[in-house]
Amino acid sequence: MRFAILASGSKGNAALVEHGDQLLLIDCGLRFKTLRERMAELGAAPADLTAVLITHEHRDHVVGLAAMARHTGLRPHMTRGTAHQLNFLADDFIPLAADGEFELGGLRVRPYTIPHDAREPVHYQLAAGDAVLSFATDIGRSNDYLLEVLGRSSALVLESNYDPLMLAGNPSYPASLKNRIQGGRGHLSNDEAAALLAAINRPALLTVVAAHLSDNNNRPELPLRLLQESAGRSGHMPAISVCPQGVPLPWTELP
Ligand SMILES: [Zn+2]
Ligand SMILES: [Zn+2]
């Protein structure tokens, strides 16, 4: 199994997962033209996609979804709640049950519930053999269920949205938006991501990618340092990197 990130953050989210003859797109928060360009940089094309998994209805995750579905003929997988918010008709999507598991060509897919201010949001864990890849963004707070799900990961794409001081001091964010971001159904701060990593860090965890960074309230070196410190304290150091917004994160192969 290998994965790549096409975009991550409030300007758009999309990732690729490849295993055997499967090529999955997770979220489609890029306009179709940009999606095609960024896929091409990674040696792929929308026509190669075999399935599309959607997490929730927020614009930064679905802005290119309708065009992508039209061009590829694929019916995206999503919860009924997400489909309802997006006005997708029953024939136009494949409904999935949060916390159920299904298989796509040898890849076990587990959508799991995330605490986020959308109708019925999920994120995805994908497993094949010992490789267990978890995406965990758009999470207001950690909880025991998340720790249990994410604790199985060998690779983890983990939200590190904001630095609390930068957010608090940002004059262009109204209080209501600050409260939403910091709330239990908003986004994880760098500190919260580091605490989550400390709680699940095990020798099986090989790779951590900090993702969904705020352009305005974060700097890549902040989550990098906090996640490294967190891993260092627990005595096991996975490879830690940060996903930039504007360029694709190239393929990472999972053993
Ligand atoms: Zn969201
Ligand atoms: Zn988001």
Image: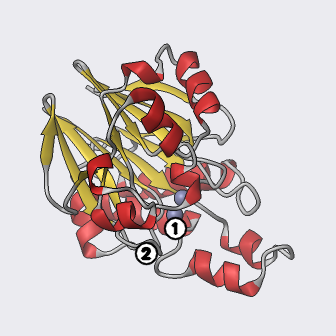
Q: Is residue 97 visible?
A: yes
Q: Position of residue 230 (x, y in %)?
A: 46, 58
Q: Is residue 121 visible?
A: no
Q: How is the image coloured?
A: secondary structure
Question: Residue at 33% of width from left, 68% of height from top?
Answer: 81
Quarter of the picture holding the C terminus: top left
- Count of marks placed on residues: 2
Residue annotated with mark 1: 188
Q: Secondary structure at mark 1?
A: loop
Whether 37 is drawn above or below 56: the answer is above
Q: Nearer the viewer, residue 219 or 102?
A: 102
Given the image, on which type of amino acid does mark 1 rest?
Leu
Given the image, on which type of amino acid does mark 2 rest?
Arg
Quarter of the picture holding the N terminus: top left
Mark 1 or mark 2: which comes first in sequence? Answer: 2
Q: Residue furthest top?
A: 43
In-image side of 235 versus 85 (left or right)? left
Question: Residue at 69% of width from left, 85% of height from top?
Answer: 176
Q: Which mark is residue 141?
A: 2
Q: Would you say the residues marked 1 and 2 are in contact, meaning their CB atoms lie under 8 Å apart? A: yes
Whether 246 is drawn above or below 86: the answer is above
Question: Residue at 55% of width from left, 46% of height from top?
Answer: 29
Report crowding for label 1: few under 14, some 14 to 19, many 20 or more residues within 10 A (C-alpha). many
Quadrant of the displayed image that contains ligand 2: bottom right
In-image side of 222 versus 232 (left or right)? right
